[in-house]
């Protein structure tokens, strides 16, 4: 007899894991299918930042805050670690300080809890920040960090405890509900939710071809674990980051900063580089990243991009050891006009993908939104 579940989730990245969790917690029988024997995509190749402060005010910021709540619930229940260290955006130019001060003034009215700190206040929060030339920073206690390699690898074990049937190493090749065909046979399901990252070719390729989705390649690095139990403290961002996160687009002072960066740092514009810094569970420091867009991703990394990232990091970051132990790139799906992509290519089949590099931040909130939209 074929096996049966109320909800089939296709994709074992963080977005798929989140959908399986929310469905199971709502009392539904769930099967999760992942083509790889382990998750190896963008969900483990990122900073591990749960970063509501980067989301634009309104619905997306509220979704990020709700996702944060569920993240903490899941981490406690699954006995997985996280670093509740908050975030600091640091400023070394007047225009960066202007943007951060303006944001801090607007933020309380639109749902953000953060404050502008003078240089001494920043240094009190973080000994990792370069004091020379520091003009201040934006502090937020809301953000926290997980080690994506650890958490994404172990979350399936917790889902199994909740009764989710797991099939890793089983590619779904065809969906015609109630039938789902995969490598281990057939499943019956009432609903199929596809969280398939940047796989645009396997299922419903005609839809993806006209969807407006593309791929984004991001180069990243990680140091060896810092010696002596050294702690980064808050995850760090600096002036270049203000060009990327949509939360800061409400600042009238942002255009001046963008103009200066384009004029003074054209190589950072060419590769769309900004620099974020986080710490993993073993004490290593993650650094990145760049952004290169296109359906066909270059498999070869560019050493000059890594050098640009490190050069910028050294302008605001003090580490005991900057030696790079690991280098890699991640690939995520993204849409130029939408914060995430949804489609229903057939009755009962729902695609949700492309949170555009914010998958760790939005995953659980987006899963809850999906379930509500499906009436589950």
Image (cartoon, helix red, strand yellow):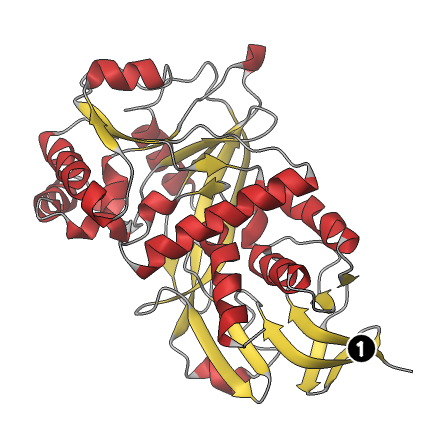
Coordinates of residue 283 in the picture (x, y in percent): 56, 23
> Residue at position x 23%, y 36% from top?
239
Is residue 295 rendered to the left or right of residue 97?
right
Q: Is residue 327 above or below residue 212?
A: above
Residue drawn 29% across the image and 24% down it:
316
In the figure, residue 120 lies in which quadrant?
top left
Is there any visible trace of residue 256 in the rendered image? yes
Above-or-below relation of 182 to 262: below
Where residue 287 sits in the image (x, y, percent)? 44, 34
Image coordinates of residue 331 in percent, x first then y, are 49, 57
> Residue visible at 33% across and 60% down?
59
Which residue in the structure is indicated by mark 1?
A: 4
Describe residue 330's horizontal placement relative to residue 1 as left or right.
left
Q: Is residue 106 left or right of residue 272?
A: left
In the picture, which quadrant includes the N terminus? bottom right
Task: Give the farthest residue toward the right.
Answer: 1
Number of marks in the image?
1
Whether residue 46 is situated above or below residue 279 in the rendered picture: below
User: Circle 1: is it few (<14), some (14-19), or many (20+) Cα within 10 Å?
Assistant: some
Residue that appears at 52% across and 66% down: 198
Residue 19: % across, % down: 59, 63
Residue 12 showing in the rendered view:
no
User: Who is closer to the viewer here, 187 or 284?
Assistant: 187
């Amino acid at each position: 007899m074929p096996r049966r579940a109320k909800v089939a989730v296709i994709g074992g990245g963080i977005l798929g894991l989140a959908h399986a969790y929310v469905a199971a917690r709502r009392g539904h029988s769930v099967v999760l299918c992942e083509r790889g024997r382990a998750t190896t995509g963008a969900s483990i190749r990122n900073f591990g930042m749960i970063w509501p402060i980067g989301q634009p005010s309104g619905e997306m910021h509220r979704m990020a805050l709700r996702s944060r709540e569920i993240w903490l619930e899941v981490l406690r229940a699954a006995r997985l670690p996280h670093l509740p260290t908050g975030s600091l955006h640091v400023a070394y130019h007047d225009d960066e300080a202007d943007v951060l001060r303006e944001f801090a003034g607007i933020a309380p009215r639109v749902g953000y809890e953060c404050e502008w700190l003078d240089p001494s206040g920043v240094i009190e929060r973080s000994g990792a920040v370069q004091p020379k030339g520091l003009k201040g920073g934006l502090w937020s206690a809301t953000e926290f960090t997980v080690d994506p390699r650890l958490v994404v690898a172990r979350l399936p074990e917790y889902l199994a405890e909740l009764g989710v049937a797991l099939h890793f190493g089983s590619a779904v090749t065809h969906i015609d509900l109630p039938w789902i065909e995969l490598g281990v046979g057939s499943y019956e399901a009432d609903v199929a939710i596809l969280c398939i990252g940047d796989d645009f070719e396997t299922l419903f390729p005609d839809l993806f071809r006209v969807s407006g989705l593309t791929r984004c390649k991001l180069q990243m690095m990680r140091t060896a674990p810092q010696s002596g139990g050294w702690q980064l403290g808050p995850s760090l961002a600096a002036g270049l980051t203000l060009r990327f996160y949509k939360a800061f687009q409400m600042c009238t002072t942002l255009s001046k900063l963008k103009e200066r960066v384009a004029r003074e740092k054209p190589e950072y514009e060419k590769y769309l580089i900004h620099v974020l810094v986080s710490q993993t569970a073993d004490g290593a420091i993650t650094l990145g990243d760049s952004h290169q867009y296109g359906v066909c991703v270059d498999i070869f990394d560019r050493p000059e991009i890594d050098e640009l990232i490190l050069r910028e990091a050294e302008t605001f970051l003090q580490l005991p050891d900057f030696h790079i132990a690991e280098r890699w790139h991640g690939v995520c799906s993204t849409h130029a006009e939408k914060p995430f992509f949804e489609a229903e290519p057939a009755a009962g089949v729902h695609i949700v993908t492309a949170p555009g590099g914010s998958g760790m931040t939005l995953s659980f909130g987006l899963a809850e939104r999906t379930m509500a939209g499906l009436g589950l």
